[in-house]
Image: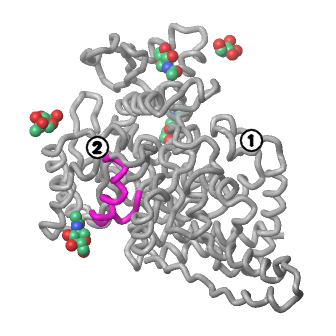
Amino acid sequence: MAVPLQRPHVVCVLLCCLTTGLSIPDPRQREALIKQEASMQTGGQVVLTDAEQRLDDLLVKMKQEEMAKADFPPSMHFFKARDLIRSSPIFSLLQKMPKGGALHLHDLAIVDVEWLVKNVTYRPHCYMCLTDDRSIRFVFSSQQPKPLLHCSTWMLLEDLRAKMANVTDLDNSIRGNLTLFTDQDPEVAYPSQDVVWKIFEQKFQALWGLVTYVPVFKDYFYQGLSEFYVDNVMYLELRVLLPELYELDGCSYDKAYTLKTYQDVTKQFRANHPDFFGMKVIFTVHRQVNASVMTGVVEEAMKLQKDFPDFMAGFDLVGREDSGKPLWYFRDALSLPADRGVPMPFFFHAGETNLQGTEVDENLLDALLLNTSRIGHGFALPRHPLAKDMSRRRGVALEVCPISNQVMNMVKDLRNHPAAALMSEDHPMVISSDDPGIFGASGLSYDFYIAFVGFGGIRSHVGSLKQLAINSIRYSALSQKQQEEALALWQTKWNKFVSENAF
Ligand SMILES: *[C@@H]1O[C@H](CO)[C@@H](O)[C@H](O)[C@H]1NC(C)=O
Ligand SMILES: *[C@@H]1O[C@H](CO)[C@@H](O)[C@H](O)[C@H]1NC(C)=O
Ligand SMILES: *[C@@H]1O[C@H](CO)[C@@H](O)[C@H](O)[C@H]1NC(C)=O
Ligand SMILES: *[C@@H]1O[C@H](CO)[C@@H](O)[C@H](O)[C@H]1NC(C)=O
Ligand SMILES: *[C@@H]1O[C@H](CO)[C@@H](O)[C@H](O)[C@H]1NC(C)=O
Ligand SMILES: [Zn+2]
């Protein structure tokens, strides 16, 4: 899948000796080395058209202006940088740019929470209760729902709002329960990885009942596709827990129904937007389960993969690596498909950790041993030379989600993100946004901005952007034939984008 890196031969080593007897290095040699090094980065070998070159000149000028400012967004926490990014001309351009696919996203976090607050919680039959630890839960029900353990009595939101003169505070508190984004100082609100992960998982619990009511689920997912579509993303691979969806009378459906619903809504979205390429799902389970539960889930995954061969891309484990079980613990269950000769591509999260040398830190090597197709995050990869080499040689791309890594307290200044170095040597990678709704982002452009401006600095150029977009199709789970179709569609969009923005 990946073209191995061609390192151009050093042709000019002798030049320096030919000039003068002085020991000042030869400027022509220096120039050649700088060029050679720049050509090793992601997109470094891309030959630009005249129009692309003009667009690049414009981008370089914009970047220089951006980097000269006192507040450089990639060096700040995203919550403080978001407004600055929104007003950046580079960001506006990136929003318009056809970015290809977003390959690392989670089901319950792809929609801007504003829509959930203003649209979903205003629908009839929406009940809310307040948990002992001041989080909230939702359920839609035609009658007073059964009480939930460790939660207050269910309150009908319609009644609650009717009694209030001003609902702003209530709506703000609901919003606060659905996203990590805050106007407070993020370093005070989320001082450590332990704290931020605990609160992060609470958001998912609050979202769960709100989103899994059948009519809401369909609209929610359609809304998610729309947000990526307007952000010029044409294809998604979505990691899904396949929650059981429910109706107003409390009855619920199985995982196959949820998968079918995803497929139907995707079809409908494509019918309304023919230039959207589509979606595949990666079935996931929380890594907190034990080995026997995992065996059952893998059996289930094999069945779903058989029933939805084109729509389901494969399997993965979710949840915090540091507090969950390592991949190696699940080796028996995860080898079942290979043992039975059933195709089951893996897309493992691995290396989303700062705990070097622990059992969990071996997830990167174990993911590769289990033949993973891509690596989710791979934040720790540069500290594993062998895993890094295997990932490059096998074309196992990293799904780099910069804003997620920063919000989850892995790295403060995004210029120091490990993928910055990987991008300078064209390591196989794609850029994605993980849980944009929970991080106060949307679509893919914010993360592209960080990768382009923060990782690449002045050096990355239009070729880098082009390569990242192409990577997102080449490293996707699409078949060879589908990839060619998707690339052709992307190329048309790209040409239009370049001609409209290069002056
Ligand atoms: C809520 O969203 C649905 C589906 O997107 C839309 O049809 C409806 O008009 C929206 N309602 C409100 C009150 O915004
Ligand atoms: C409602 O409350 C919010 C926040 O407390 C306040 O900013 C807003 O002006 C109030 N709206 C009205 C109509 O009073
Ligand atoms: C969650 O909602 C509850 C109830 O409205 C509120 O007391 C609490 O402050 C909210 N939490 C956040 C983080 O906004
Ligand atoms: C695994 O977890 C399930 C569900 O929590 C539980 O029923 C089962 O007893 C556990 N099995 C073992 C061997 O611990
Ligand atoms: C990984 O691939 C190798 C080589 O094709 C194969 O022997 C092995 O069974 C695979 N392992 C898994 C867990 O898929
Ligand atoms: Zn993830």
| Residue bounds of the magenta highlight | 359-375
Of residue 64 and residue 99, the one placed in the foreground of this image is 64
Helix, strand or loop at mark 1: helix
Classify 241 as above or below 341.
above
Q: Quadrant of residue 421?
A: bottom right
Residue at x 30%, y 58% (from the top left corner): 366
Quarter containing the N terminus: bottom left
Q: Point out residue 450 in the picture as x, y percentages from the top left corner.
A: 64, 52
User: How many numbered circles does the render carry?
Assistant: 2
The crowding category of the residue bearing disc 2, from other C-alpha atoms within 10 Å (few below 14, some 14 to 19, many at least 20), is many
Within the displayed image, which quadrant is ligand 4 positioned in?
top left
Of the two numbered discs 1 and 2 on the same chain, state the one appearing first in sequence: 1
Q: Quadrant of residue 75?
A: top right
Residue 84, label in figure: 1
Q: Position of residue 293 (x, y in %)?
A: 16, 43
Against 182, is 436 above or below?
Answer: below
Which mark is drawn over residue 287?
Answer: 2
Give amino acid for label 1: Leu
Quarter of the figure that contains the C terminus? bottom right
Q: Is residue 312 visible?
A: no
Q: Nearer the viewer, residue 468 or 111?
A: 468
